[in-house]
């Protein structure tokens, strides 16, 4: 007998009850009963687990045989269910989208998608199933547990304080494997984590809760910002790519967790907007390009998103290009600014995939290098905090299917450029690039630009080191430097020394920490952007 789908009424969902009649782990699925039970979200709900997972190839379907019937599902979901049952849980209520929603009923699917935010926020826990096997993750999970419980332990191989018989390459590959699972690259899994009040990560028979994983990340970030970091010219352990996982580095891998944490704490990090969410998760993938937008609408982004929802309806009859253009216009109308134009992202590391897209519309399907994506996100986040336009709103009018008109102001003329901060494999040394930037900056101090450089008057005066430091850091500084006069200039001096140094890892820790802070500002300003 197949699973029975009784009709749902407004606000109702189905939960899958798994009842195993034996403690025998071998062949337990054949002794497990599956039944769909209807509950109302508006009433008291029993405790249940919401499964967060990757469907796998939708065309690769198999049959699951259980006590009393069969069910069709993807091969990956069958493996997950078999793993759940074999783990010894005898009676469990689970919400699984592929089984609890009648996938053959399009109207029901649309209604249930609207309830997913409620479902994941009520689940206890949200079970993130990253793998049905444990082996590749065992070493990495052990290290992450130690990093969380002992934040004083280093991970840089030159002063590794883990047991000496552990090979650093194998350790790094295992840690990266935790964050290399496909789950971390999918759009829909964002809201499943962010909305969950309790999240547990599962790797076969092994589990780790989000609290432990976040504590481990905090420990790694602390070490990476100082003692275990050297920088781009002499790659630290955290930047070395893992060949076993497509070149993903430990730094890139752990950022995937940080992005989810930031979105959950959106108010604290200034990302509480649909544009902030689209930017944060731009590298994530989905089968349907429109889900780059629709997959973010379930997040709790406050009144701004509610206003946008009134302008953006979930309509799969629209083409992705039409939807992206409508969203761009809706965001401009709602915000009164043109910030979205900063996300068109015409950089070497961004490769558009949608054809026939207007030049003013971001391609949210574009492939973006993960390292560049981090700095692009930082750059656009900081840009959004500025207010050069004051109280004025953008004058913006759509005059055709692909054309718009707006009002602009001429700020200057670009007469010369130099290479921007290299993303990797720079052909020039740090000193050569620094000299090129300085020479270009000194030349820009002419009659017109003089007031922008040092207040005007005497445009023949050579700009100071402090003014140069302000320019390459985008006239930004760190929050913890604001109340320390001269700290920005000190950090610039340390960074200049570090940037040109042949062995930056040999520099004192204080110099490297200052350099790291200033380097973040420079990358957010200049990575893959020509200086002009």
Image (cartoon, helix red, strand yellow):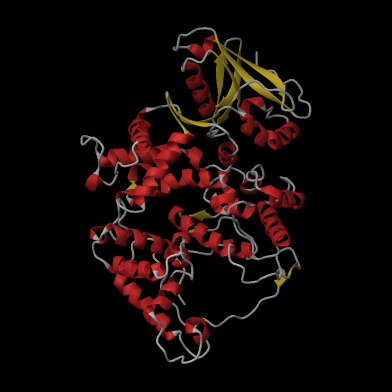
Residue 63 in percent (x, y) is at: 56, 20
- Toward the left, the furthest residue is 164
- Toward the right, the furthest residue is 9
Q: Residue at x 59, y 57 (%)?
A: 363
| Residue 280 in sight here | yes
Say above or below: 186 vs 197.
below
Say above or below: 452 vs 166.
below
Q: Residue at x 35, y 62 (%)?
A: 514
Residue 398 in percent (x, y) is at: 75, 66
Residue 519 in percent (x, y) is at: 39, 63
Q: Say which quadrant the N terminus sits in.
A: top right
The residue nearer to you, when weighing 60 against 31, is 31
Residue 32 in percent (x, y) is at: 55, 12
The residue nearer to you, when weighing 224 against 51, is 224
Q: Residue at x 73, y 30 (%)?
A: 105
Number of numbered discs overlaid on the protein picture: 0
Q: Residue at x 71, y 60 (%)?
A: 329
The residue nearer to you, when weighing 239 against 378, is 378
| Residue 247 in sight here | no
């Amino acid at each position: 007998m197949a699973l029975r789908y009784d009709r749902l009424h407004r606000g109702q969902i189905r939960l899958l009850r798994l009842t195993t009649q034996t403690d025998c782990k071998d062949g337990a699925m054949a002794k497990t009963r599956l039944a769909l039970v209807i509950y109302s979200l508006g009433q008291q709900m029993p405790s249940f687990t919401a499964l967060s997972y990757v469907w796998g190839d939708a065309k690769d379907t198999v049959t699951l045989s259980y006590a009393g019937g069969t069910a069709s599902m993807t091969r990956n979901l069958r493996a997950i269910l078999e793993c759940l049952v074999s783990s010894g849980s005898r009676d469990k209520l689970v919400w699984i989208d592929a089984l609890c929603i009648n996938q053959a009923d399009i109207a029901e699917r649309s209604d249930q998608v609207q309830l997913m935010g409620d479902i994941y926020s009520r689940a206890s826990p949200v079970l993130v199933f990253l793998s049905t096997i444990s082996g590749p993750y065992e070493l990495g999970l052990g290290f992450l547990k130690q990093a969380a419980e002992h934040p004083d332990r280093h991970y840089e191989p030159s002063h590794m304080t883990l047991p000496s018989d552990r090979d650093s390459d194998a350790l790094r590959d295992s840690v990266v494997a935790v964050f290399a699972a496909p789950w971390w690259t999918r759009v829909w899994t964002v809201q499943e984590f962010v909305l969950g009040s309790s999240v547990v990560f599962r790797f076969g028979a092994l589990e780790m809760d989000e609290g432990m994983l976040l504590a481990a990340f905090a420990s790694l970030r602390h070490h990476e910002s100082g003692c275990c970091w050297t920088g781009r010219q002499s790659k630290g352990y955290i930047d070395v790519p893992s060949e076993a996982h497509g070149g993903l580095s430990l730094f890139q891998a752990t950022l995937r967790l940080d992005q989810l944490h930031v979105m959950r704490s959106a108010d604290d990090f200034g990302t509480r907007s649909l544009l902030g969410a689209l930017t944060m998760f731009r590298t994530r993938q989905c089968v349907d390009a429109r889900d780059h937008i629709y997959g973010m609408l379930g997040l709790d982004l406050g009144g701004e998103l509610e206003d946008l929802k009134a302008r953006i309806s979930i309509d799969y009859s629209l083409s992705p290009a039409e939807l992206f253009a409508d969203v761009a216009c809706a965001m401009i109308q709602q915000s009164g600014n043109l910030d979205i134009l900063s996300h068109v992202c015409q950089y070497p590391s961004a490769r558009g995939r949608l054809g026939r897209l207007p030049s003013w519309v971001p391609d949210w399907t574009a492939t973006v290098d993960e390292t560049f994506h981090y700095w692009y996100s930082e750059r656009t986040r900081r840009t959004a905090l500025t207010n050069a336009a004051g109280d004025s709103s953008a004058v913006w009018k759509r005059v055709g299917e692909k054309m718009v008109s707006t009002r602009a102001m001429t700020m200057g003329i670009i007469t010369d450029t130099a290479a921007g901060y290299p993303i990797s494999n720079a052909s020039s040394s740090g000193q050569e690039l620094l000299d090129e930037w300085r020479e270009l900056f000194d030349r820009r101090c002419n009659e017109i630009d003089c007031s922008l450089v040092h207040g005007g008057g005497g445009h023949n005066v050579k700009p100071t080191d402090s003014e140069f430091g302000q320019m390459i850091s985008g006239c930004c500084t760190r929050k913890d430097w604001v109340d320390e006069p001269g700290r920005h200039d000190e950090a610039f001096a340390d960074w200049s020394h570090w940037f040109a140094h042949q062995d930056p890892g040999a520099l004192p820790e204080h110099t490297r920490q200052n350099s790291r802070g200033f380097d973040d500002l420079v990358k957010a300003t200049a990575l893959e952007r020509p200086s002009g």
